[in-house]
Amino acid sequence: MLMNNTQSQVYDVVIMGAGMAGICQARHLLLNIPNIKIALVDPRPEERADKDMKVGESTVEISTLMICKELGLYDYMIENHPPKFGLNFHWPKDPAKTENTDDYFHLWATRQPPLASVLINRPKFERDVLKMNKEMGVEFYNGRVVDVDLTSGDELNSVQVKLGDQQLELKTKHVIDAAGRKFIIGRKTDNLVFGPENLYGVNNGSAWMRVRNVDRTIFHNGYDPANATCSHYYATNHWMGHGHWVWMIPTDTESMELSIGLVHHNDIIPGQSVNTKEKFSAFLEANHNVVYQLLKSGEEVDFHYLPRLAHKSKQMYSRDNWYVIGDAAAMFDPFYSMGMTMMSFQIENVTEIIRAKFAGEADVERKRVVYNNFAVNMIARNNHLVSHHEKQLGNASIMSWRIFLENMWWFGVLIPMYIGKWHLDLPFLHKFGKQGRGAVVAETLEEAYKLFDKLLEKKQNLGFMYTHRMDELPFGYSITKDVSKYIGLSKYEPKHCNIYAEMRNTYFFVALWYLKLLWKGFGLPGLLAPKNFKRVLTLLKISAQSYVDELIFDYQTRNIPTNSAVAKQREEFKNYQPRTELQSWQNLATVDANDIKLPELAEVGS
């Protein structure tokens, strides 16, 4: 029931939630749809509280590209947030001895990644981008959403906002839930899915703290001339153990602020054993003492605990013009910072659907259906990445192999897909789904994880697989190599990157990785087992299909420049004539010699 003093405003889009997802979505819409009228609603003030923190403060390549490239915030990020130099992973050599980094086996990032990523101070980012959005025309309502009336079809939706003693009614065709765990639309539409039985067995919680002015030399003194060309501290450091992992993320360079958090699996570590600051600190002291020392070296800022991390949505983009993005849509585990990655794809999907509706395009409903299916399936595939973690996290051998495999998909398929905007291309998404190329990723991961479980039972040491080296697989394979040269040739425009070449390369080398796992883990019987052999053949088949598509794509785009800006400059340069003269900046002929004063020379010997 609306209050009598209710006022009504009409917008093109109302975004509920002005956190990371909401402000990024608003800016993306503003940059891509001229004259769009947007309202942002959030109960938190514009000057975000110092303790207004979320789980994780780290981006990876795709979310960095979205923030910096698509939102035009390169300079802002460089000037306000720390750089990130990849992911480091650490396993105790002896769980009873974790006093310093020498007590761990390490998977260090050895060099700066080919694509940048950043660490992020969330309150600062959200405050600053909200301000930018307001300057671009967004209306910000510092109030609480008390109800939302979702209509069918293209009828206007109604968002009721309590603003102090006043209640507003915001009318809008498009309503976006970016309000995180408030789950405004999720609860209204029975759209949420909880429980490990529905979430690939994932049953996790998280505790985290921030501290300032830490003594980072407890972790590393910064001197490592023989092993790396990048900082170990300015990375996301993962401290691994049975049933858990601990993150260590620097979020500010001036205050030396550090975010330290634990993700634990309830089957192994019950939530009530780590759900207070004292219990969390005691856990670190016992299991990762070097991290505990870091925490105690600084000034405590805050503590948070979430008993249940994982959830997902049945639908992402409705035909009734509502959308769920960010944590309001899905969350499993921040192990690879995949929440912001999925958010990046979601933001571009939503903008394209709304843009197409504004333009009255005939295929807009098909876009919505295909994008929705892609987003739902991406949740399933990406979050397979944390299934079976509860038993495997503490095994350095198995997890190093697993991290290698998961990075193959990341650099080989997802990054080029995002850069080339293939996630917006309907024919590609149709082919990707119809031929089962996406499903094969999830199936391969699931089968590999089951094999790892068997190896755990055998207590077999597979050896340590180094993600950043080029000698783990034949032919000098490197995870970060872009075979279609999309980085080297700046193929950053939509569909200039040959996604099929990247897929051909990735599926082929995943097959070789799988063969190596079978041979080292199970010998000839495992290699020749029909189920395993069929998996390898399926990967090789899709690699071959992708090679055909690669050749077709190369032929179809043979007359298209790899980068239009470079092609334009090369064309203009054909008329370039070298000139050696300078343009006059001072007419010396009009200067009187008497006006030119020379400095007095000091006397010799003075």
Image (tube, rainbow, N blue to C red):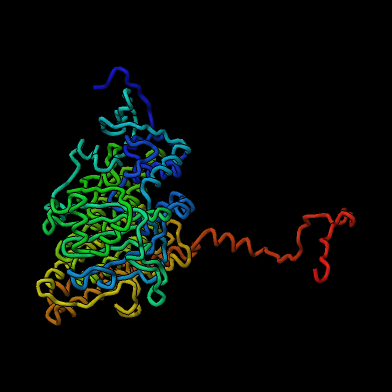
Please tell me whether residue 460 is drawn above or below residue 233 in the rendered image.
Answer: below
Name which residue lies at 41% across and 59% down. 83
Please tell me whether residue 125 is drawn above or below residue 112 in the rendered image.
Answer: above
Q: Is residue 398 visible?
A: yes
Locate the C terminus and report the quarter of the image it occupies.
bottom right
Near-viewer residue (44 or 75): 44
Locate the N terminus and report the quarter of the image it occupies.
top left
Q: Quadrant of residue 172?
A: top left
Which residue lies most toward the left here? Answer: 457
Provide residue 379's location: percent of width, then percent of height: 24, 53
Near-viewer residue (281 or 304): 281
Which residue lies most toward the bottom here? Answer: 524
Name which residue lies at 13% across and 51% down. 272
Please tell me whether residue 12 is drawn above or below residue 590 in the rendered image.
Answer: above
* Left or right: 500 in relation to 512: right
Q: Quadrant of residue 256?
A: bottom left
* Left or right: 100 in relation to 496: left
Provide residue 458's location: percent of width, then percent of height: 10, 75
Name which residue lies at 35% across and 79% down. 476
Provide residue 303's location: percent of width, then percent of height: 25, 48
Name which residue lies at 23% across and 40% down. 183
Please tell me whether residue 502 is drawn above or below residue 370 in the rendered image.
Answer: below
Which residue lies most toward the top here? Answer: 4
Near-viewer residue (457 or 527): 457
Provide residue 315's location: percent of width, then percent of height: 23, 45
Q: Is residue 549 visible?
A: no
How many numbered dots are placed on residues in this image? Answer: 0
